[in-house]
Image (spheres, rainbow, N blue to C red):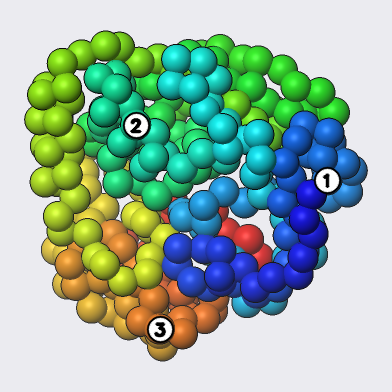
Amino acid sequence: MKVETVLLKDYTTLGVGGPAELWTVETPEELKRATEAPYRVLGNGSNLLVSDQGVKERVIRLGGVFQTYDLKGWVGAGVLLPLLVKEASEAGLSGLEGLLGIPAQVGGAVRMNAGTRFGEMADALEAVEIFHQGRFEVFRPEELGFAYRTSHLPPGGIVTRVRLRLQERPQEKIRRRLMEVDRARKGQPKRKSAGCAFKNPPGQSAGRLIDQRGLKGLRVGGAMVSLEHGNFIVNLGNARFEEVMALVQRIQEELPLELEWEVWA
């Protein structure tokens, strides 16, 4: 186990966040020790906005055995989702194509039911192992209350492993599906961001609504609504937490949109 003080801006895809005590755990025994005091869990740092003041709780990150995987067995929650999508496609296993391009670890993807219009994480799950109240327990997906960009894990629960629901399929069909999903991603910005900022209202696109309201390019300090895609807020270089939140609020004054990110403040 490694314990160090870090700046969370270096561990988030948006590049915003202050100091925290980071605990990188590599075994179930280390995870039990790390959760003996108040904690938060950090995955790949996408879909996350962190205060410049950092957080008081220890921040737990999964390494070691939690980053091992077997596509036909258990997959650690610390494994990167893009790696799994690639490995599954090369193995002729279908079920993850709709998650192409999501820069999350498996655990975070489960927690928020990450997805695109082509599919959600919950669609690919057969079983989920969760650590809570000092023990490991396996749940069926239907027990975890998955819905659009949300789930209902046990309070304080940490996803540790999953079993995936994959099917053998000709690689050419998998490749065609991946190309279809990839084409839909071409308009996403290349600057630092935390992914889509707002949930899509039923039957609508948050990005399209923001674009129609003429908010692309709206800027507060170092934070700006992306010119490429209205549902992305990008870091122009040194954006601060307060600037990003002010920009979020400016958009919400114009449109009744629900924030998709998790906020640590």
Crowd class of label 2 (few under 14; some 14 to 19; many from 20; radius 10 Å): few
Q: What separation in Å lies between label 2 and label 3 (alpha carbons)?
A: 33 Å
Image position of 67 (left or right of 221): right
Q: Are marks 1 and 2 in contact (CB under 8 Å)?
A: no
Q: What separation in Å lies between label 1 and label 2 (alpha carbons)?
A: 31 Å
Crowd class of label 3 (few under 14; some 14 to 19; many from 20; radius 10 Å): some
Residue 253 x, y percent position in the rendering: 37, 68
Q: Residue at x 32, y 26 (%)?
A: 88
Residue 156 x, y percent position in the rendering: 73, 37
Q: Measured along the vertical axis of the image, is residue 137 above or below residue 191?
A: above
**Picture quarter containing residue 10?**
bottom right
Q: Residue at x 87, y 41 (%)?
A: 33
User: Residue beneath label 2, please?
Assistant: 87
Residue 104 x, y percent position in the rendering: 45, 46
95 or 232, which lies in front? 95
Residue type marked 3: Gly
User: Residue beneath label 3, please?
Assistant: 237
Image position of 62 (left or right of 182): right
For mark 3, give the secondary structure: loop
Q: Earlier in the sequence, mark 3 or mark 1?
A: 1
Callout in the foreground (2, 3) = 2
Q: What separation in Å lies between label 3 and label 1 (alpha carbons)?
A: 33 Å
Q: Residue at x 28, y 79 (%)?
A: 218
